[in-house]
Amino acid sequence: MSLRVLTDTDRQSKLEKGQSRILAQLDGICKKFAGAQHNALEDIKIEVFQKDFLSIVGPSGCGKTSLLKMMCGLIKPTAGTISWPTSNFQNSPENPANLSYVFQEPNLLPWMNVYENIKLPLKIVKEDTYSADEKIYEIIHLVGLQGFEGYYPRQLSGGMSMRVSIARALVTQPKVLLMDEPFSALDETRRFELSQEILKIKKEKNLTVVYVTHSIYESVYLSDRIYVMQPNPGKVFEEFDFSGIEKNEDYRFAPEFFEQAKIVSDSLQRAQHA
Ligand SMILES: Nc1ncnc2c1ncn2[C@@H]1O[C@H](COP(=O)(O)OP(=O)(O)O)[C@@H](O)[C@H]1O
Ligand SMILES: [Mg+2]
């Protein structure tokens, strides 16, 4: 199966065949910030399937960050609903462990070492020390930070700091990882390295990932599905489905990869002038 625009009929048939289950459904989402003249987001309909790697791609200012913030309850939509139909977890501050957020900047606390930074969310939910320690070391291994536990943020490179930030997000054992342009400050080699890591972690931890980026190559490499957004106001322009495409290391240099990147790139161009 090759890359294509997902139509309502395709989506319905995927769901009916049980190939996908909806984890989160954003329906008719609008957002108007206080004092703003216009809507930042308008009539957004997005479905997140379980175990999906879903990317949201769009130009700066089209509302990607606002969408992620709404998904984790940091801000509220002006209209529309966000529901989690197949799971019993609520999109609520009372239940933060199911959903973690990785920001664009690592945001590490400079006076805490790597170990303490990763432990922070467990301290907040008052996890006891023994099991906390076990979880922290498991995650440290998973993200390749072993040996760096005692380092302070000022002693770490950008890539290593981002690993700590990802580890901190994973330590509460979330089911869903929301990532907001996490690798945009890194050079090409580190970006690729960390993309590979994220795919590995996603598989190992059975995660659903919602990934915001403006990088077409990154989104095509990583995603099962992509939503391309248009700006002013932010709306979904097109949706792509990559299911059935084998994503291994060779894929990054395969002709299909470049073809697919071109399709998404064209879509983004059209979205910008829509
Ligand atoms: N807290 C806020 N108050 C007012 N306007 C905001 C706020 N947050 C975002 N916006 C506006 O909403 C639009 C979408 O922003 P954002 O979600 O950050 O987009 P993106 O992440 O795609 O760059 C922008 O026009 C931005 O200026
Ligand atoms: Mg943003």
Image: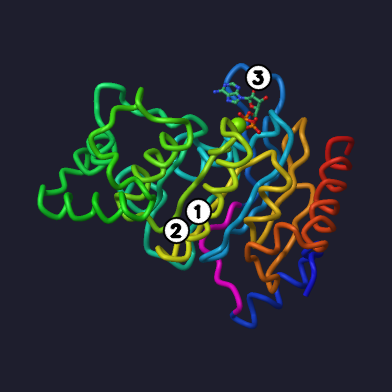
Amino acid residing under circle 1:
Ile
Q: What is the x, y in percent for residue 273?
A: 89, 35
Tell me which secondary structure the magenta stretch mostly adopts.
strand
Residue 229, percent from left and from top: 74, 43
For label 2, the SS is helix
Dot 2 corresponds to which residue? 201
Nearer to us in this view, 227 or 179? 179
Classify 10 Å Cα crowding around label 3: few (below 14), some (14-19), many (20 and above): few
Q: How many neighbours does mark 1 have within 10 angstroms: few (below 14), some (14-19), or many (20 or more)?
A: some
Q: What element carries label 3?
A: loop
Q: Which of marks 3 and 1 is in front?
A: 1
**Horizontally, is 265 left or right of 152 in the view?**
right
Q: Earlier in the sequence, mark 3 or mark 2?
A: 3
Indicate the amino acid at tag 3.
Ala
Mark 1 CB near ligand 2 (8 Å cut): no
- Dot in front, 3 or 2: 2
The residue that label 3 is drawn on is 36
**In-front residue for pair 153/104:** 153
Q: Which residue type does callout 2 highlight?
A: Ile
For the residues labelled 2 and 1, say whether their Cβ atoms are less than 8 Å apart: yes
Number of numbered labels in the structure image: 3
Give neighbour class at mark 2: few <14, some 14-19, many 20+ (Cα, 10 Å). some
- In the rendered image, residue 21 lying in the magenta stretch gets the answer yes
- In the picture provided, is 224 more to the left or to the right than 134? right
Toward the front, the furthest residue is 147
The residue drawn where x is 56% and y is 38% is: 183
Residue indicated by mark 1 = 198
Q: What stretch is highlighted in magenta?
A: 19-26
